[in-house]
Amino acid sequence: MKEKIIIGWREYVDLPDWRIHNVRAKVDTGARTSSLHVEDIKLLKDDRISFVVIPCEKNRSRKKHIIAEKFKQGHVKSSTGDRTRRWYVKTRIRFGGIEREIVVNLIDRKGMNFRMLLGRTAIDEDFLVDVDRSFLLKVKKKGAKK
């Protein structure tokens, strides 16, 4: 059995397919799938979807216009019991030296403290969560080589 990487209840993650780095994410072990704050969702031809990712509310100039293949549409039940219909896409995520493809649902998280929630499927197999600690993984410095 391989040793698991310990992560905090919040970490910085990269979405390399979209050239997005250092997104502050909350680890949500109560959620199966990860969620990402997006704006301006538009359905395109050929099973594609476009949207805008704004990784940091305080620096909206970092926004990225993304076009991705639609994976599916489904319902998500919030912790308050509300059901919403959301689009899902696949993308790669990188943190803690691990890179993998995950499924992310797209949602407007304005007013929330975190632009992204990391669900169980994003952290299974490789990570353990220390709920008393935060940002245990190194953050890349600006201009640092990959």
Image: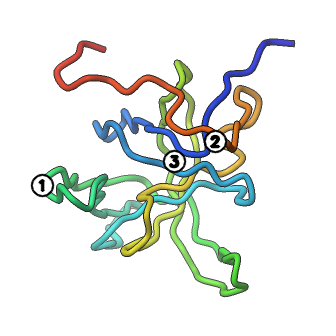
Dot 3 lies on which element? strand
In the rendered image, residue 115, in percent from the top left (x then y), is placed at: 41, 58
Marked residue nearer the N-terminal end (1 or 3): 1
- Residue type of the residue flagged with mark 1: Ser
Residue lying furthest left: 61
Check disc 1 and report the residue beneath it: 61
Marked residue nearer the N-terminal end (2 or 3): 3
Say left or right for 100 vs 66: right
Residue at 51% over, 68% down? 87
**Which of the 4 quarters of the picture holds residue 72?**
bottom right
| 2 and 3 marks in contact (CB < 8 Å) | no
Within 10 angstroms of label 3, few (less than 14), some, or many (20 or more) residues?
A: some
Check disc 3 and report the residue beneath it: 90
Quadrant of the snapshot with the N terminus: top right
Tag shown at residue 122: 2
- Residue type of the residue flagged with mark 3: Lys
Say left or right for 98 vs 55: right
In the rendered image, residue 56, in percent from the top left (x then y), is placed at: 28, 54
**Which of the 4 quarters of the picture holds residue 75?**
bottom right
Height in image: 137 above or below 45? Answer: above
Residue at 31% over, 70% down? 39
Height in image: 22 above or below 104? Answer: above
Q: Nearer the viewer, mark 2 or mark 1?
A: 1
